[in-house]
Image: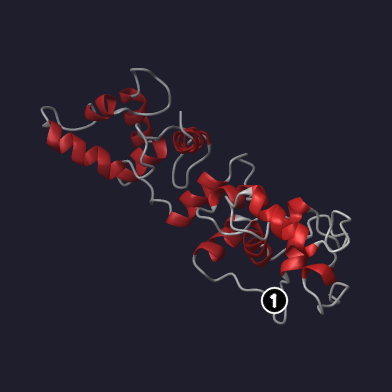
């Protein structure tokens, strides 16, 4: 099973486990929920595969029509439909936004927040890790080390902004343990992800003038302030 399919499976299970807006999962089931339960028989796993979904359509529906409707309902893009997808399809509830869906996918530990590690996993491409740290710090408006749904939405819609006058120096972003020194590992976070370690080592050794296995601010950027700027 690929990472993508694993995440989608988690998403499908989550959608069936949480209370959905506009439904009565905590009380008497709605007509749509009963329809879903009646169709979920082979196997009864909280989701509808295409064969099960077909039983909810008019009798005698042709394969082309079935495929079209299944694709329309399957906004999670998995091999089966969740209860949420089915209720959206029949018009019982509104479809989640792209930001809501991406939040669920990124929230790997399902705790309702996105931490830095999860943001790193959710960020494609070769962007240096310090860039992801910067993005996280800007988006984490309440500085609680997690992105809420609201903060995530601002980030994904391009509305997350840094505080006025806030600066993000590369050295500070890389200095994970905040000891005013960069180890080789911390220094590597300034390179594009996927950079071969040998390339990092060559540059690190060149900057480490006194061979003490860490970089000071002056070694990293001669002439730059040797102490962090005042908050």
Residue 168 location (% of width, % of height):
71, 72
Residue 70 location (% of width, % of height):
25, 37
**Vertical order, 120 against 215 (above or below):** above
> In this rendering, would 225 be left or right of 35?
right
Residue at 30% in and 42% down? 73
**Vertical order, 46 against 187 (above or below):** above
> In this rendering, would 147 be left or right of 75?
right
In the picture, the quarter occupied by the C terminus is bottom right
Residue 158 location (% of width, % of height):
51, 69
**Vertical order, 182 against 194 (above or below):** below
Front in this rendered view, residue 118 or 211: 211
Q: Is residue 136 visible?
A: yes
Residue at 51% in and 34% down? 10
> In this rendering, would 80 be left or right of 126?
left
Per the image, label 1 sits on a secondary structure element best described as loop
Instruction: Point out the residue furthest to the bottom here.
Output: 165
How many residues crowd mark 1 within 10 Å: few (<14), some (14–19), many (20+)? few
Q: Can residue 115 be seen in this view?
A: no
Residue 139 location (% of width, % of height):
63, 64
Front in this rendered view, residue 169 or 53: 169
Which colour scheme appears in the figure? secondary structure
The residue to which callout 1 is attached is 163
């Amino acid at each position: 099973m690929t990472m993508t399919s694993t995440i989608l499976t988690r998403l499908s299970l989550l959608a069936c486990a949480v209370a959905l807006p506009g439904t009565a999962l905590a009380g008497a089931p709605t007509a749509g929920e009963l329809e879903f339960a009646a169709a979920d028989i082979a196997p009864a796993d909280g989701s509808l595969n295409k064969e099960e979904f077909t039983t909810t359509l008019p009798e005698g529906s042709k394969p082309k029509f079935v495929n079209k409707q299944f694709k329309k309902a399957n906004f999670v893009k998995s091999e089966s439909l969740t209860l949420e997808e089915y209720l959206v399809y029949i018009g019982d509830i509104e479809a989640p936004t792209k930001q809501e869906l991406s939040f669920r996918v990124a929230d790997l530990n399902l705790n309702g927040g996105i931490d830095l590690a999860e943001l790193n996993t959710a960020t494609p491409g070769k962007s240096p890790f310090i860039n992801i740290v910067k993005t996280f710090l800007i988006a984490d408006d309440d500085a609680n080390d997690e992105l809420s749904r609201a903060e995530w939405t601002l980030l994904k819609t391009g509305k997350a902004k840094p505080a006025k006058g806030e600066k993000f120096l590369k050295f500070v972003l890389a200095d994970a343990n905040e000891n005013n020194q960069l180890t080789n590992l911390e220094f590597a976070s300034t390179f594009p992800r996927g950079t071969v370690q040998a390339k990092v080592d060559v540059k690190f050794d060149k900057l480490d003038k006194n061979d003490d296995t860490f970089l000071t601010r002056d070694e990293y950027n001669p002439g730059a302030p040797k102490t962090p700027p005042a908050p």
